[in-house]
Amino acid sequence: MVTFGHFVLPLLLLGGAITVEVQRPRGVPLSKRQFYEEDKPFTCLDGSRTVAFDRVNDDYCDCPDGSDEPGTAACPNGNFHCTNAGFRPAFIPSSRVNDGICDCCDTTDEYNSGADCQNTCREMGRKEKEELQKLAEIAEEGFLLKKQLIQEAKHGLEEKKTKLEEFQKNKKDLEANVETLRTVKETAEQPEREAKERHLKAWEEQKAAIRLEKDRARMVEVLVELDDDADGFVSVAELQSHSELDPDSDGSFTEAEAQGLLRGMDKVDAVVFETVWNNIKEKYVSESNADIPPPGETPPEETPDIVSENDSENYPDEDIPEEEEDDDDEDDDEDDDMDDGDYKAPPTTRTDEKKKDDDDEGPMPPYDQETQALIDAAQKARDEFNEAEKALREVEDQIRNLEKEISFDFGPSSEFAYLYSQCYELTTSEYVYRLCPFNKVSQKPKFGGSETSLGTWGKWAGPEDNIHSVMKYENGMGCWQGPSRSTTVKLTCGKETVVTSTSEPSRCEYLMEFTSPAICQEPARFDSGHPDHEEL
C-alpha cells in the first residue's frame, strides 16, 4: 500500500495567486518526485532492483538503499523528507518516523504514532527571519564601516608614501651632514690626542723622577742602617745581619752569599753600594719595621692554639674519640707530604708598597689651558657628530617602519590597516587576554603575575577563497614538556572591533574569536517573504 502526501504549493501567475496540489509518496522531496510514478514499477534509486509500485512505503524494505520506504521506518538507512512549509525543509533518518518524537516542525514524521505534535514551522520561520534580518543589518552597517576604513586606509597610505619620500630626502641631507661632522671631529681629535699624549708623557717623566728621588732617599737610609760601625762602608758581616736578604731563602745566609751580593767585595762604600742596591731593595726590611709582620702573615695573637701531641697523654687512650684519632693520622700524613716535598713559603712582594708609593705621587695634574681648549673643542665636535648620527638613525628607523607598513598585507583594499599598532583585551575569570594584530597575543593572570606569550604574528591562514578571515600567531612561550604556544584568531563580521571569546581546544593551541567591520562583505538584499518551499 502506497502512502501519498498532499502538498499545496503557492504559485504566482500573471499577478494572481493560484495553488497547485502536488501529490507524491510520503517522505519524498519534490526534487525526486519524477522517480516515484504511480503507474510504473519503481526502480531503486541505486539501480539495484525494480519492484511493483505498490511496494513503495509498504513498511517492508525491498531496496538496499532504502529508497522504496521514504515514508516508513522499515529501512535502517532510509531518509524521510520533512516538507516544513513556512520554514526550511530537512531530512531525518527514517528510523525516527512514527517513533513518538516530533522531529519535523510540520509534524509529518509522526503521522501514525498518535504523538501530540504542533506545527511550529511558521513560528520558527518567523524567528529565523528576524535573526537573519538582524544579521543582515549588522552586515550592512559593518560593510558601511568597512568602506570608511578602506577610504581611511587609502588616505593613510598616500600620507605614508609622502612621508616616506620626505624621510628619504632628509636622510640624504643627514648623511652628508654626518660625513661633514665626522671630518670636523677627526680634525679636532688629532691635536687633542697629541696634546694629551704630551701631557701624559710629562706626567710619567715627573712620576719617574719622584720615584727615583724616593728610591735614592731610601737607599741612603738603608746604607746608614746597615753601616753599624758608621765607617762609611757596608761589610759582609753587616749585610749578614739581615737574614731576609738570603738569596735562596734556605735559612742560612752565608758569608759567600753576602759577598756575592756585594759584587765579590768584603765591603762597599756609598758609591759602589748604589750598584748593590738594586739586588737587595726588594727584600730589605727596615729595622724600624722589623716588628711589623709582612703582608699575609698572621699576627701571633691571631694564631689558633695548637694542642701539643703530648696533651693526649693527659687522657686514657680509650677516652680519645675515634674521629680525633683519624684527624691526627691525616695531619701526620700531610706533615709527611710536606717534609718530602720542596715546599717553600711564597716570597713577600712589595706590590702594596709600590701602590702606596704611586699613591704618594698624587693624581695627574690638570691639563694646561691650551690642552684643555683642544679637549673642549674636540668634545664639542664629538657631541655634534653624535647628535647628527642619532638623528640619522632615527630617520632610518622611521623609513624601515614605513616601508614595512606600506608593504604589509592588510587585505585586498587595506581594510585591516586600522588594526596596526592597536591592541584589544578580553578579561575572563582568570586571565586578561591581549591581542595586538600583526604583532602578538598574550595572556596575564587577572590578579597579578607575569605575561605569557601565546604567539607572535605568523600569517593569514584562512581558506583559499577567504584567506583574510583567519590570523595565525606562532612561536609563543613553550609549554612544559610540550610545544610552543600558538593562537588562531577567527574574524567575523561586526560593527565593533572586539575580542569576543578565547578557548584552548588543544593543549597549547588557543582559539580567539574577533569581530571587525573589516571582514564584513556586501550583504545580499534580504527577501521579506519566506517561501513555503525552498526547493522551488
Image (cartoon, grey):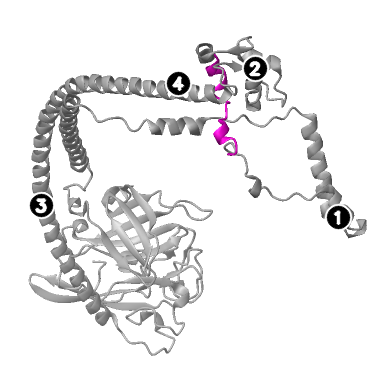
Residue corresponding to mark 4: 216
Residue corresponding to mark 2: 236
Left or right of residue 531: residue 458: right
Q: Closer to the N terminus: mark 1 or mark 3? A: 3
Residue corresponding to mark 3: 152
Residue at mark 1 to residue at mark 4: CA–CA distance: 61 Å
Residue 293 on the magenta segment: no
Please tell me the numbered disc located at residue 322.
Answer: 1
Coordinates of residue 475 in the picture (x, y in percent): 40, 48
Observer-nearest residue: 367 or 390? Answer: 367
Q: Closer to the N terminus: mark 1 or mark 4? A: 4
Mark 1 belongs to which amino acid?
Answer: Glu
Coordinates of residue 303 in the picture (x, y in percent): 67, 47
Observer-nearest residue: 387 or 439? Answer: 387
Q: Nearer the viewer, mark 4 or mark 3?
A: 4
Chain part drawn in magenta:
276-292
Q: Nearer the viewer, mark 1 or mark 3?
A: 1
User: Disc 3 on helix, strand or loop?
Assistant: helix
User: Disc 4 on helix, strand or loop?
Assistant: helix
